[in-house]
Amino acid sequence: MAELLLELLSEEIPARMQARAAEDLKRLICEGLKGAGIGFETARAFVTPRRLALVVDGIPAVRDDVSEEKRGPRVGAPDPAIQGFLKGAGLASLDQAEKRDTGKGEFWFAVITKKGGPTADALPVVIDGALKALPWPKSMKWGSSTLQWVRPLQSIVALFDGKVLKGEVSPGGKMAPIAFGATTRGHRFLSKGTFEVSNFADYQEKLRAAHVVLDAGERKNIILDGARKLCADAQVTLNEDEGLLDEVAGLTEWPVPMLGAIDAQFMDVPPEVLIVSMKVHLRFFTTSGADGKLANRFVLVANNVARDGGKTIVAGNERVLRGRLADAKFFWDQDRKITLESRVPGLEKIVFHANLGTQAQRVDRIVALAAEIAKSIDGADAAAVAQAARLCKADLVTGMVGEFPELQGVMGRYYALGEKLPAAVADAIGDHYAPAGPNDRCPTAPVSIAIALADKLDALTSFWSIGEKPTGSRDPFALRRAALGVIRIVVENRLRLSLRPFLKDDDLLAFFAERLKVQMREKGVRHDVVDAVVSLGGEDDLVRLLARVEALQAFLGTEAGKNLLTAYGRAANIVRAEEKKDKGLAAKIAGAPDVALLEQAEEKSVASALDEVARRVKPALDAENFAGAMEAFAGLRGPIDALFDKVTVNVTDRPEIRLNRLKLLNRIRATMDTVADFSKIEG
């Protein structure tokens, strides 16, 4: 068994694309090997800022002969079909094909034998196919190249069993092909020249000697361990961030954590400003002091080994941060000289959407919506809601948000507090974008809830009104996130709010139902159970709807629930079958059966049990005792089983009795469907 080593060396690959590219390369090579009939044992992909690498172990040095059959057209088929079959199978004439009776007629078959031979002969085609098929979120051409790649390719290592494969990749245009080889380079600054490798172990060892840590996981550990030690020595705590760690590991081939300091003059700027400047713009890790507040130290990760222990690198990064924070402090000081209220007219100059007007017009809509929503929220002071709604977008015209758009809402809260506005108003301004994602916290204060809901419901109804709805692949205005935000706010605060007056569009209500199913599925709730409740229609109180869902799922988990589902299925299946035969039957069997036509004791027993269920279910539903409503059905299974055992429904010689018995079965279905559409339940 032999090893395949592949390395694609290029200019820097964006960190956000690296992990996916490594997995895609592995997938495409593995698929190519299988397609060529080449077996293998394991495949491992690696990525650094400058290289994609793959090692595949356990490949046979020689491929066995492989035979495959290809079925062609029916014997006697038109000549074009025959010629197409022959061409596809690589046959000269039908004399090289076989006739076979498949039981459905005679068909032509071709037996194609693919000769084996040295595996090395087949690998270049596999590699070339994988490189051409590798999907990049964004790609480019360079020079006169016609090859689409994320960044200009420099060299390709392609070794099989320690030997260079015969092959090349042509960038196209006037550029020379890049031949497969055994030569690569190390770190851009910490190594010089090229070196040859003979296998993966040799490759990995020589890369490390050339200051390249190939494995991204190892680079992350180096960064994290080094950063923790630096912070411990400085008596601060590292604010660990998995996303930032992944990104920084994708920016360095030889990571060296270093500790820097923030100038004291900037520490009175809101911590969110410092964090955005360090984390988002400069890829620094922030730290906290013993009091849990943001400390004046940060961790940067260099891609270099400094002769002076990193003093120059740290000083340079501190200087860059100082410049950015100087701008932030200027905006912080200047913005506080002007009130949020005085900034509101400036929103007339900001276009929200070409077809939806300005931010000022949007604020007017949010004010109206929030006032209506607040009526359903205990403790939501109308004056505070109106003020918060009017000011919620005012920070969009501040210098700070202009420089740091990530801080919209956050800065509005700080400016409101600085103006001594009510805390509820300030918090609502800061919270109205929340939750921004599944792990973000939800607003819980009454005024904050009203403004956050108004913001999201306006976005949904506004974009819906101009036909800008999410598609399978596109959601440019984050409407799915807005809907999930509404659902989380309502459900987590157990807010008794009817959504229909705010959504109006049935299609938008259906969109909410789909988002609800997604969220519930992530919490372990069966999608068919959600469907069963949502399908009833008319339920737009999410708290009540989810209480129904929880009660139904719990009931179906009991023996009584499983038995009842079986009984429902028996009754509903008979009714559906008869309705298919007679299109007008549904109208005929609507309503209660005629008691006078109930002949057998089993019929009367079911009718009596249904009367008892109806008597118990309606008050339970009115009281929102959904568990009690489910329990009311538990006694139906026995009488229904007895009905099916003793009573013939389709008595064809007595049409009035048959119709009455179908009415009885239909009543079973209709009674149970008052709490959920049981036909949606799987199994």
Image (cartoon, grey):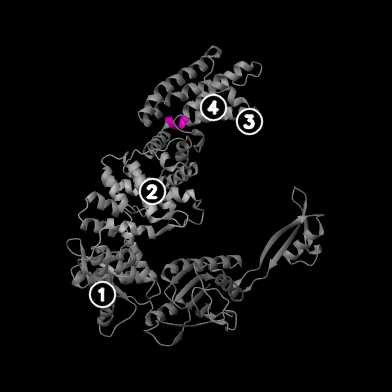
Which x, y percent locates residue 541?
39, 38
Q: Can you tell which of label 2 and label 1 is closer to the viewer?
A: 2
**Mark 3 crowd level (few <14, some 14–19, many ≥20, 10 Å Cα):** few
Using the image, tell me which numbered label, if any, was put on residue 365.
2
N-term mark: 3 or 4: 4
Q: Which one is closest to the eye, mark 2 or mark 4?
A: 2
Label at residue 322: 1
Q: Is residue 111 left or right of residue 529?
A: right
Is 447 on the left-hand or right-hand side of 500?
A: left
Kind of residue at disc 2? Arg
User: Residue drawn at (48%, 33%), measured in percent from left and top?
Assistant: 677
Q: Residue at x 26, y 46 (%)?
A: 384
| First along the sequence among labels 4 and 1 | 1
Provide the secondary structure element on which disc 3 rests.
helix
User: Are discs 2 and 3 less than 8 Å apart at CB?
Assistant: no
- The alpha-carbon separation of the residues under discs 2 and 4 comes to 50 Å
Magenta region: which residues?
A: 560-564
- Within the magenta stretch, is there residue 561? yes
- SS at mark 1? helix
Q: Who is closer to the viewer here, 500 or 318?
A: 500
Q: Position of residue 356 (x, y in %)?
A: 45, 53
Q: Which mark is residue 571?
A: 4
Under circle 2, the secondary element is: helix
Between disc 1 and disc 3, whose residue precedes?
1
Disc with the residue nearer the chain's start (2 vs 3):
2
Residue 521 spot, x, y in % from top left: 43, 46
Disc 1 residue type?
Arg
Distance between the alpha carbons at the discs numbered 1 and 3: 77 Å
Which residue appears at 48% of the width and 81% of the height? 198
Q: Residues within 10 Å of mark 4 (few under 14, many from 20)?
A: many
| Quadrant of residue 262 within the rendered picture | bottom left
